[in-house]
Amino acid sequence: MSMSKKVVVIGGTGLIGSKAVKRLQDGGHEAVIASSRNGVNAYTGEGLVEALTGADAVIDVSNMMSFDTAVITDFFATSSRNLTTAGRAAGVRHHVVLSIVNADGLAANPYMAGKLAQEEAVAASGQAYSIVRATQFHEFIETLIDAYSADGTVTVPDIDFQPIAAADVASALVEVALGAPKNGTIDLAGPERAAFQSFARTYLDARGDPRPTRAETGIDYFGAPVVTGSLVPGGAFTKGRVTLADWLRT
Ligand SMILES: NC(=O)c1ccc[n+]([C@@H]2O[C@H](COP(=O)([O-])OP(=O)(O)OC[C@H]3O[C@@H](n4cnc5c(N)ncnc54)[C@H](OP(=O)(O)O)[C@@H]3O)[C@@H](O)[C@H]2O)c1
């Protein structure tokens, strides 16, 4: 009997999705690259039945950006309801969704509220599922530095940070998807935990950017108040392998 599985990657053309597709293919599995530009729209439902028929698992790494809580919450909740409903009808055995570590504690941030709504829709769906919550990607640090830059200085919250490479996230998602549903949540974080400021410094130094960095208490995370542990796992987690320094070298 073949151990090869068919896995639909919703958002299969994106940063994480394209890496997950490659991992699946390298492992001898069939990966369906689903995205709205490929005619599979998780939000409207277009093309879902066709894409999911015969699939063993779904990995949902779709994404959208909005600073409007109602818009982002509607996108993630509606998409997850559509995907799990179509998945159950098609006989899919496992729905895996990528969320963010501590999304529930950061819901004052509109995007995190959306991710929380996504998690809740999946958990309430009746479909067998795994929620994988990752920390911030190495690939996202530049966006964070831009957001915390003002007057030639990068001033970040005085909190811990534990970023992870997108490649490690994709590998973990594939491993989870090929395994049994957890019907619960798994945290995923990078190999190093340190002050947010030290990662910002490492990033800027590697880019030859001389801007000074500072850490301050009381600075929020896109609208969400944060404390030391807000962006890192509070308990057990799966550890990625690629450090920020390794990632910057490649
Ligand atoms: N950035 C971070 O540090 C971080 C940390 C933890 C978790 N995450 C999560 O990681 C996930 C993936 O992020 P990413 O950076 O890989 O995203 P990305 O590069 O922006 O890719 C998003 C993908 O979603 C697809 N998509 C958008 N709307 C869709 C729809 N209605 N139906 C089907 N596909 C749709 C896009 O393709 P089309 O445009 O063709 O539809 C694209 O393939 C997100 O859910 C995010 O919350 C991010």
Image (cartoon, rainbow, N blue to C red):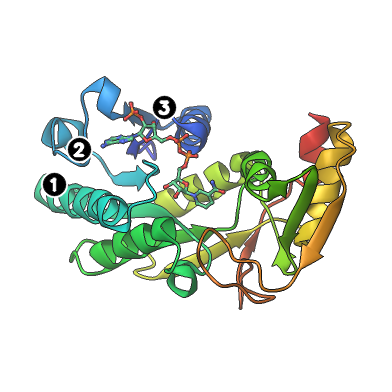
Helix or strand or loop: what does disc 2 sit on? helix
Instruction: State ligand 1's quadrant.
Output: top left
Q: Which residue is mark 3?
A: 13
Judging by the rendered image, the residue that carries numbered circle 1 is 86
Q: Which mark is residue 52?
A: 2
Res. 198 in view? yes
- Which residue extends farthest left? 89
- Is the CB–ligand 1 distance for label 2 below 8 Å? no
Image point 83% across, 32% down: which residue? Answer: 207
Q: Amino acid at mark 3?
A: Thr
Dot in front, 1 or 3? 3
Which mark is first along the chain, 3 or 1? 3
Q: Amino acid at mark 2?
A: Leu
The alpha-carbon separation of the residues under discs 2 and 3 comes to: 17 Å
Of 2 and 57, the residue lying toward us: 57
Please, is residue 238 above or below residue 92 in the view? below
First in sequence: mark 1 or mark 2?
2
Locate the N terminus and report the quarter of the image it occupies. Answer: top left
